[in-house]
Amino acid sequence: MKTIRQMLLFARAMQDGYLRLLKLLCPDVQPTCADPRENRILELTHIFKLVYNLTLEAHRNTAGEGIWAQDQHFEAKLKACVPWMVSALATILPSNFRYPDATRAGICERLSRRFSEIQDGDRLQAYIPGSGDRDAFRKIFERENQSLKNVVAEFQDHQWHCERLDRQAAVEEIERETRLWFLNNLAQDANVPDVIRAASTNRLAAIAKGTALEGVWFRDALEATRQKGDKARVDKLLSETKELDPSDRWLPVWLHQKARHHINLNEWNQAKTCLKEAIELTRIQSFGPTRGLLSLDLLGLELTKSAYNQRNHGGLVRDVIMFGVVDVPPTDKWVVVTAETHFWEELYQPYAGTTRRKRARNQRSQRR
């Protein structure tokens, strides 16, 4: 009876998870819908089934040969079964485990590219067609193949601009450019000539309005202006950025920059309020290190008033670690020292005319 109860509880948990996920991803679809084109949870189930079965097959076929042979077998079979999904399954490919930073950056770039293209009302992309649906399979394969070609073409064009000698011709080309991601990479690459970077920035600002990259442009401009100590310009940019529909995806970014602005004005209570609100918003929608960076700022700010306390600050330390802000497996004390150093030596840069606060002695003792 104990085993039966456990199986029923497990089945109930799976059912509850299915219903919640369906409500989140496909709110207008009935739980009994068996069409994978409408009920996208079925597609997730098929993907899980494929990965699960290939894992078991790799274990059986490489018994006694070690984990390395098992990983090779699994990855080879996965690429043979669904070659168009290799990039989508990057997080579970064993060959990527040797380069975790590069893999993480690649996943971030892929998601950012996709997010920048999404329009209101777009459906979730399909990766596995319905049974026998050859037309759907062709569309999926062509879409992924074209996406790969676009990335390669952008990389080649980017390298070409790094080596361009005819700067005027390059500027004229950029003034006609429409690829937002390409322009964003050009504008941020220090290896690109300054005149081309400037032209890319201007073109990006002109065509990015209303897209995801508009927020990226404002964020970078705010951070650069704040570090230069231009208080009036930061105020102006914050006011302009507020118009980027702050009720949606850019509110955490806006609050983060506003908090850093408050910190430089010695308005630390207001900064703390902004950071806490931004962290709560990232629990709803966030990817990448944003929540970790927010937690690092807030932890450093909290430690200006009190020593580290596991109950009050433990969650912030975990966020700093889990969201990729630090690269080595640290201890809590190591993160605390990092947060203090970050706050006093990097983050806190009071504007001209603002009195610089001094670090308390008890904080210096924590570092020892």
Image (cartoon, rainbow, N blue to C red):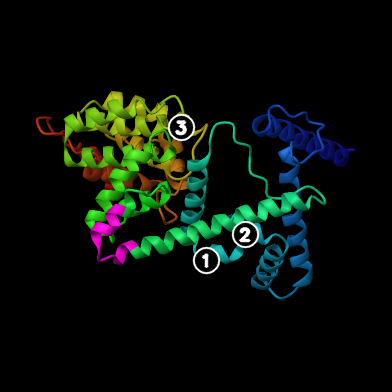
**Which residue is disc 3 drawn over?**
249
Tell me if mark 1 has few (under 14), some (14-19) or many (20+) residues whose alpha carbon lies within 10 angstroms of its own. Answer: few
* Residue at horizontal 35 percent and vertical 31 percent from the top: 254
* SS category of the residue bearing label 3: loop
* 186, 283: nearer the viewer: 186
* Residue at horizontal 39 percent and vertical 61 percent from the top: 157
Which image quadrant is residue 265 in?
top left
- Up-down relation of residue 117 to residue 255 (above or below): below
The residue under label 3 is which amino acid type? Answer: Arg
* SS category of the residue bearing label 2: loop
Give me the disc on residue 86.
2
* Residue at horizontal 40 percent and vertical 48 percent from the top: 325
Q: Earlier in the sequence, mark 3 or mark 1?
A: 1
Q: Earlier in the sequence, mark 3 or mark 2?
A: 2
Position of 185 with respect to 139 (left or right) is left
Give me the disc on residue 59.
none
